[in-house]
Image (tube, rainbow, N blue to C red):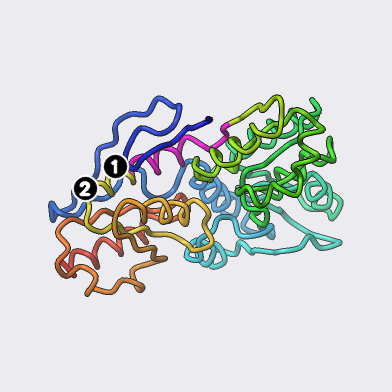
């Protein structure tokens, strides 16, 4: 049986990871995870977007879709004059940014055809998943993308693979794969890639099922190292905490997965910002652990910490 991850708080992925050291806050019973907040892909996207506006003050700067899943960041960008659009207009003027989640090849062409100067800020890790999916499709594998079908990253991965194969599906459960069981059996070989922010438990589930259907299953575990490290450290922190506070957008896949994982370890709450904190939560709680999703700004984390300290 394929199994990458087992248990809460154990080494769970085939990566060489440094042992994380938590950030102890002024109260020794409150610990902040080291890998909390912006990952390098998100940081790169946000900083580059701001730099583009700074260097091109007279140009229109647009982002197709939310650059990252965080309302505070989107509002900050809007205040700087960087506008979020959700459709490519027929005619455009200025710079159009591809967000960190990536886009379909068709969308790239639409942006260029509209007359925009295109800046691609797709996360490098997402690019790798796209490339692996394309390779599988070109080599006649039945391609299974482990992820949420309506997530922009997954939609972009599928769109890239669809150019080379008609056998590309998205699933995180056996129920979602069952309608394709006969096709996978007749195809005989299946290839797997994973949304960068997915849980390894979902990968295990899908691969174990595919092993009952296909003669060959080729697995590309494309969960990014930042996500793996964040989940590993958060689980270790949860194992010694009475309460875990997960900070980040409800629309953020990696943040919601963090909360889902930690709920199996200890009492866990998922909040978007400090306004959602109820100080009554801290009564009778000795040890509090704090972590945050990859699209959560440091300023939001700091406000949560301040409020928790006051509550304690």
* Residue at 54% across, 58% down: 69
Residue 181 percent location from the top left of the image: 74, 42
- Residue 231 screen position, x and y as percent: 40, 43
**Residue drawn at x 76%, y 30% as measured from the top left:** 141
Q: Which mark is residue 236?
A: 1
User: Is 39 placed above or below 16 here?
Assistant: below
Give me the residue at 56% from left, 39% from top.
203
Residue 228 x %, y %: 44, 38
Label 2 Cα neighbours within 10 Å, binned few <14 / some 14-19 / many ≥20: some
Say which residue appears at 69% left-offset and 60% top-offset: 60
Q: Which label is found at residue 32? A: none
Q: Are marks 2 and 1 in contact (CB under 8 Å)?
A: yes
Q: Which residues are magenta?
A: 221-233
Number of numbered discs: 2
Pick the residue in front: 281 or 85. Answer: 281
230 inside magenta stretch: yes
Q: How crowded is the residue under tag 1: few (<14 C-alpha within 10 Å), some, or many (20+)?
A: some
With 92 as the anchor, is 129 left or right in this view? left
Judge from the rendering whether residue 307 lies leftward or rightward of residue 71; answer left or right.
left
Is residue 205 rendered to the left or right of residue 300? Answer: right
Vertical position of residue 3 compared to residue 231: above or below = above
Determine the image quadrant of residue 190: top right
**Quadrant of the rendered image containing residue 290:** bottom left
* Kind of element beneath mark 2: loop
Which SS type dominates the magenta stretch? helix
222 or 98: which is nearer to us? 222
Q: Residue 240, labelled with which disc?
A: 2
Circle 1 sits in a helix, a strand or a loop, which is it?
Answer: helix
Q: Nearer the viewer, residue 87 or 160?
A: 160
């Amino acid at each position: 049986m394929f199994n990458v991850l087992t248990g809460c708080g154990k080494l769970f992925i085939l990566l060489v990871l440094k042992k994380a050291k938590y950030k102890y806050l002024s109260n020794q019973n409150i610990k902040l995870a080291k890998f909390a907040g912006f990952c390098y892909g998100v940081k790169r996207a946000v900083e580059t977007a701001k730099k583009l506006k700074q260097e091109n003050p007279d140009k229109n700067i647009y982002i197709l879709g939310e650059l990252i899943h965080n309302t505070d960041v989107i509002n900050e960008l809007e205040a700087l004059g960087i506008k979020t659009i959700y459709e490519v207009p027929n005619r455009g003027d200025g710079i159009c940014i591809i967000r960190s989640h990536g886009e379909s090849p068709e969308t790239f062409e639409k942006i260029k055809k509209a007359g925009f100067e295109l800046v691609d800020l797709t996360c490098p890790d997402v690019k790798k998943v796209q490339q692996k999916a394309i390779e599988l499709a070109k080599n006649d594998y039945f391609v299974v993308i482990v992820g949420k079908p309506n997530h922009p990253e997954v939609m972009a991965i599928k769109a890239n693979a669809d150019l080379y194969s008609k056998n590309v599906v998205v699933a995180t459960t056996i129920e979602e794969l069952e309608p394709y069981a006969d096709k996978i059996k007749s195809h005989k070989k299946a290839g797997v890639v994973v949304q960068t922010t997915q849980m390894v438990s979902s990968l295990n589930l899908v691969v174990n099922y595919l092993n009952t259907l296909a003669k060959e299953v080729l697995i590309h575990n494309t969960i990014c190292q930042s996500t793996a490290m964040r989940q590993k450290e958060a689980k270790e922190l949860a194992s010694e905490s009475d309460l875990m506070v997960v900070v980040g957008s409800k629309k953020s896949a990696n943040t919601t997965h963090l909360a889902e994982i930690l709920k199996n370890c200890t009492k866990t709450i998922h909040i978007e910002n400090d306004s959602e904190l109820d100080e009554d939560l801290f009564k009778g709680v000795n040890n509090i652990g704090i972590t945050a999703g990859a699209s959560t700004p440091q300023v939001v984390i700091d406000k949560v910490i301040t409020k928790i300290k006051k509550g304690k």
